[in-house]
Amino acid sequence: MIIPNKISGRSVTSISSYILLDNVDNNLNIIVVPNTVNEIGKGAFANASKLVSLTIPFVGKSRDAIGYEATIGYLFGENQYTDSYETYYNLPYPGMDQHNSYLPTTLTEISISDANNISDSAFAAAIKVETINLNHGVTSIGDYAFSFMLSLETIDLSNSLESIGLAAFWSTPSLGSIYIPSSVTIMGEMAFGYNFGEPCVLTIYTSSDSRPFGWDFGWNPKNIEVVWSYNE
């Protein structure tokens, strides 16, 4: 389903909450939301149990949303449905404004088309998602943004990116390689790493010659292989 940017000559600027709940096509496997949309209601894509690919302009309710409203789980709601799995907001801090959400097990690819930032815990514990596509223009990645994404294999970071937060990519054991552009001047503690007993196949490539001043000394506590001075 590709949502048009205009209907009857009027721009599509919002999507209602739980709009698919009673009308979902069980064979719906693609959803594309246009960049004209400024707000998406909670649970807008709940019950899309066959969804494989999702393209959205931003993560969550709006471009300036914060907290739980700036997570992928917000778009799928807090009620379980067929072929869904449970994920969490604020996973690293149990009991603190924690929300349980349910994502479709079939959802493997998410593309962001018009965002400036990826907020804290935006995709945390989205364990079935394999590919994340970020638009050029994303300047910051928040704390724990992609943490515990156990199936994540591919993510591209553009030259507009400036900062990566605390534990942003912690425990992503399926991620084989990642390129960090020289535009990244701030890197949080434990940005990359894994839990005891987890496999690690990751190689980190960067065009920087050595650790930039703004990268935390503990950004890579597990000493994952880093290829410095790398040119794409």
Image (cartoon, rainbow, N blue to C red):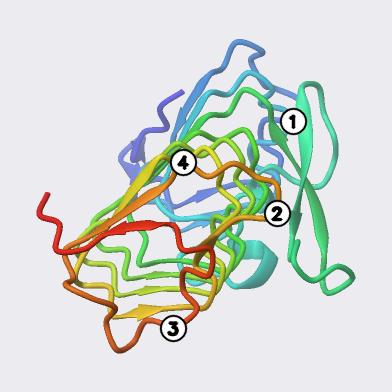
Q: Tell me the number on the disc at residue 201.
A: 4
Q: CB under 8 Å between callouts 1 and 4?
A: no
Left or right: residue 44 compared with residue 156? right
Instruction: Pick whichever, 45 or 131, lies toward us.
Output: 131
As drawn, the residue found furthest toward the right would be: 95
Amino acid type shown at disc 1: Leu
**Which numbered mark, 3 or 1, is in the foreground of this view?**
3
Contact flag, marks 4 and 3 (Cβ < 8 Å) = no
For marks 4 and 3, give the one nearer the viewer: 4
The Cα–Cα distance between marks 4 and 3, rounded to whole angstroms, is: 22 Å
Q: Nearer the viewer, mark 3 or mark 2?
A: 2
Residue type highlighted by circle 4: Val
Q: CA distance from mark 3 to mark 1?
A: 44 Å
| Residue 196, numbered label | 2
Location of residue 70 in the rendering, given as x and y in whole percent from the top left corner: 59, 63
Judging from the image, what secondary structure is the residue with disc 1 in? loop
> Which circle, 1 or 2, is nearer the viewer?
2
Say few, some or many: other residues with alpha carbon within 10 Å of mark 4 (under 14 / 14 to 19 / 20 or more).
few
Task: Identify the element where label 2 is drawn.
Answer: loop
Q: Amino acid at mark 2?
A: Phe
- Which residue is drawn at the image coordinates 65% and 71% (left, top)? 67
> Picture coordinates of residue 119 (x, y %)?
52, 67
Mark 3 closeness class: few <14, some 14–19, many ≥20 residues within 10 Å: some
Q: Circle 3 is placed at which residue position?
A: 216
Residue to which mark 1 is pinned: 21
Instruction: Give the mark toward the camera: 1 or 4.
Output: 4
